[in-house]
Amino acid sequence: MQCRGEVVKLDRGFPLVCTEDNKLIRCKHATALVKGKEFRAVIGDKLLLDLPENHDTAIIEDILPRSTELVRKDPTERALPQVLAANFSRVMVTQPLAELNERRLERELVLAHETKAPVTVVLTKADLAESEEQVEKVRQKVNALVGQGVQTLVISSEDPESIEALRELIPEGETVVLIGKSGVGKSSLVNLLVGKEVQATGAVRESDGRGRHTTVSREMISIPGGGRVVDMPGVRGLGLWDADAGIETAFADIEELAEQCKFRDCRHENEPGCAVRDAVEQGILSKERWQSYCALKNEVHQIQERREQARWQKGEKSRGYGRRSKQPGKKK
Ligand code: GDP
Ligand code: ZN
């Protein structure tokens, strides 16, 4: 029997799928679907299934086109992307308010913007801030960094009301993906949204009381009266994949300055007439942000080159050429 379903959990690599009639079933990919490809169903994927009678495993016949994708570079492969979630409606980037890491936030914002879904920044553990002034200072710093179009929310598990504004961003029918380093309080946030302990939170360490991460599964959780959240635990390295568009959005301030550079292909490093470097020298743009931008750009370009190289070598093999004869063409 054929039916449709949606991946709600990845259970040791096997998609756990919720079918149209609300049954949970473990699934395997049809051999023809994945043969020779890296294509696999991820959390949020909508599927076409074949349900053999009297079997407890269904076969994934097709993965339907995705409206959004969260993609990073596969941490174990040199030139492969890894999709972490699909078909969500918003990405929430979480960072601890009192231990904000701006450089990491920039990277997370690039990945989040690259999905094309709306992005919200959530500053957690506001109760650990030294003072109200610190809360305001960090909030303003983050607002300046994220630019227009990204809202910044401040929450604390000590203050359940603080998550109400966030709850409004997860209406019924929508799915939100949470990204952020382990220990920032994502599981605690999910528990607050659900109203009970659905995700184990990190055990509190005696020394600093901030705890460690414990969750390993990746699953979609329904919020009573609202939509769904996907916590992304285990997202260790957040290596960029294709991220030119994400960088453009996350660094709109620099992209705007770059329009005034003398050379159209200015890399904002040593070129004369560089408006970006001028802005750094005049103190309009922070040096760290400029360096962060250049580093992320370089990371993406390196990946693009590796891909070109891999593609070229593959093509060469399939054509039966023995040796490299010329360099692969650079992608513009
Ligand atoms: P996750 O790894 O992002 O899922 O983080 P957890 O939700 O497991 O939280 C890590 C640790 O921080 C746990 O010990 C939590 O109890 C603690 N924690 C989470 N949110 C808050 C908060 O708002 N304030 C304080 N003081 N601690 C928090
Ligand atoms: Zn420049």
Image (cartoon, rainbow, N blue to C red):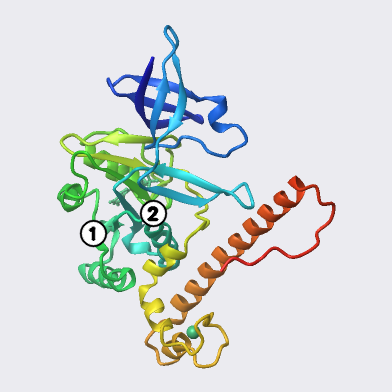
Looking at the image, is 182 positioned above or below residue 301?
above
Q: Quadrant of residue 326?
A: bottom right
Q: Residues within 10 Å of mark 1 (few under 14, many from 20)?
A: some
**Extreme-front residue of the structure:** 319
Q: What residue is drawn where x is 68% and y is 53%?
A: 310
Q: Is residue 262 visible?
A: yes
Q: Is residue 199 visible?
A: no
User: Within 8 Å: ligand 1 and the Cβ of disc 1?
Assistant: no
Residue 242's x, y, as percent? 50, 58
Q: What residue is drawn where x is 28% and y is 63%?
A: 129
Looking at the image, is 64 positioned above or below residue 50?
below
Q: Nearer the viewer, residue 92 or 321?
A: 321
- Tag 2 residue: 115
Q: Quadrant of residue 229?
A: top left
Q: Quadrant of the C terminus?
A: bottom right
Q: What residue is drawn where x is 42% and y is 64%?
A: 245
Residue 71's x, y, as percent? 47, 50
Residue 153: image tag: 1
- The answer to whether the residues at label 1 and label 2 have Cβ atoms under 8 Å apart is no
